[in-house]
Structures are given as structure tokens and as C-alpha cells.
Amino acid sequence: MKKSVEVCVHFVVIFLVFFYDYGYAFGQADTHLYPVRVDDKWGYIGKDGKIVIKPQYDDASDFSYGLARVLEGNLWGYIDLTGKKVIRSQYTKSEDFGPSNLARVSIQKFDFYIDKEGTFRGKQLNNVAPEGFSEGLIRDRKGSKWGYKNLADKTVIAYKYDWAGKFSGGFAPVKSDGKYGFIDLRGKEYGFLYDLAKGFMEGLAAVTVSDKLGFVDVRGKMVIEPQFDGIEGEGFKNGYAIVRVNEKYGFISRKGVLVISPQYTRAKSFSNGLAPVFFGTQITGRWGFVNEKGELVINAKSCLRSYRYEFSVH
């Protein structure tokens, strides 16, 4: 008998919304385990489709830096890759762990950062942008201006920007007088030359000039000339970036070469050699997984909702 299973691959875009505001981050997912729903409970499967962590939760996120968020009733906690509960379910809201090994959580109306042992770090957060902590600094807004402070609530970079993103690789995108540039951890500014800028990922940052998107390196050199219509997500991940050309998405290498031509309605980043892609319209289309050659290796029956896929498994 076949059992219907939903696989949910959550991808945070900050910005990504940064755009995402997926400012987001520049989290790194440990995606050799994937959230899966069976009979209204969530667990995890491996790359081979076999269940590794028994479905038992009311919701579940991707693994990020070794831990995943799981929902029990109305409260969130964290488990490790073995399924062990390492931080008990006690938070009304939670976010993924990032490269600083801290995660933002809420208990009722109070927001804090915790470490991987569940210990509160720093002061209670007030009016701090969600997903705003990275590389030791919190992106924060006072009135209409953005700046950065540390966990001790001390201002480190003055509140003078119209918008500010998270730090990644030692740099953060910021906006001033209608243009985007970058600052380093000391607040030194680099070239407000762009119509839009995302954070650095794998040493490159997506920037937009005259409605076309390209990539710069940390020296400010345009290493991939502006030629694309847009991007999905934050930028490069596992060696590839997802770019949009004429309303279709494909994948480029760090050299700017289109390794998989733009042909998908939606696409998400590669993990362990596979990337989820969507074909067709939201009504008649379907999700599947392609390998790095662009070959469809897992074919989904239908798209249920954002980032959720239905498969038939034995």
C-alpha cells in the first residue's frame, strides 16, 4: 500500500526574504534530514526517503547548525540530528540557530537569544528586527534609522542608515541616500553604488545595477557582470546561485556559467546534491528534485503549498 507523505523543505530568505528580509540570514541548513509529515505528525526522513526520526511533532523545521525546531502543542523546542530533545519545548516563537550558535526565541511577549544549551544570552530584546543577530552584532532600528549594537545593548555602529542587513563574512549590506553599499564590522563603508544589494554568501554578494543583477566579491570587484533579472534566495549556496531570466529560474556556478538553464517556475538551493524545483503553474504544476546535472531524480505528484511536496512511498 502506498502512503502519502509531505516533505517540507523550509528555506530562509531573509530577505529572503531579504529582500528576504531574509536580511536573513545566512543560515546554513544541515539538510541530509528532511521534515516529513505522516498522518498529521512531523518527523524526518533521510535522502533515501526512509524515516529517521519518528513523526511525532505538530510542526518541524529544517536542521540548521545541528539543531531543528519542533512544535509540541503551542510551544517550540529543539532536537539534534539523532532526534534527542536538547532544548525542551517552552517557547511561543523560535528561530533557527545561525553561525553564531545563537537563536532568537520568545516567551509570550519577551524576546531573547539562547545558546545551544538553552541558556539566555545577552539582554532582553526590545524592538529588535527579527533574525537580526549575526557575527556578534544585532541590526537594530531607532526611529527611521538603522545601526548595530552588541548583546550588551551597546551601540557599535551608529544609527544612520535607511536600512541595514545582517553581517555575513564580515560585511553587511546597508542603504543610504537611495543607494546600497557595504560596511565591515568596524563600520567602514564601501561604495554605495548599487540599486539593491544582498549579503555575502560564499564570498560573493548579489547586487543590482540598472535593473540587472550580478555579483561582487569582498574587494568590490564585479566578478559576474549584471545580466540576470533577479535571484531566488540570498545568493550562492553549496556552489550555486539561483537566477531568474525571463520569469524562469536556473542555476549558475561561481564563474557565472549557467549550469542548469532557466526553466523552472520556482527553485531552491542545492543540499547534498539535490535541489527542489517547481514546474508549471501553481494550479497544474508540480515539485520535484534535480541533481547537479539538471536531471529530475525525484518527481513529486503535486504541489500542496509553499515548499511542501507530496510523494508516494512504500
Image: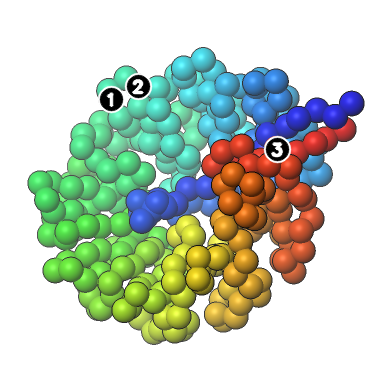
Mark seen at residue 68: none
Check disc 2 and report its element: helix, strand or loop.
Answer: strand
Neighbourhood count class around disc 2 (C-alpha, 10 Å): few under 14, some 14–19, many 20 upward: some
Pointer 2: what residue? Answer: 107
Q: Quick check: can you spot residue 268?
A: no
- Nearest to viewer (mark 3 / mark 2): 3
Pointer 3 and pointer 2: residues touching (CB < 8 Å)? Answer: no
Three-letter amino acid code of the residue under disc 1: Phe
Residue sitting at x 56%, y 65%: 249
Q: Which residue is mark 3?
A: 310
Position of residue 249 relative to residue 20, above or below, is below
Residue lying at the far top of the rendered structure: 73
In the image, what residue type sits under mark 3? Glu
From what the image shows, is residue 175 above or below residue 108?
below
Q: Mark 3 to mark 2: distance in Å?
A: 34 Å
Marker disc for residue 110:
1
Report crowding for label 3: few under 14, some 14 to 19, many 20 or more residues within 10 A (C-alpha).
Answer: many
> Residue 142 location in percent, x, y?
12, 46
21 and 200: which is toward the camera: 21
Q: Secondary structure at mark 3?
A: strand
Position of residue 291 measured from the top left corner of the image (x, y, whole percent): 74, 61
Q: Are marks 2 and 1 in contact (CB under 8 Å)?
A: yes
Identify the image's colour scheme: rainbow, by chain, secondary structure or one colour.
rainbow
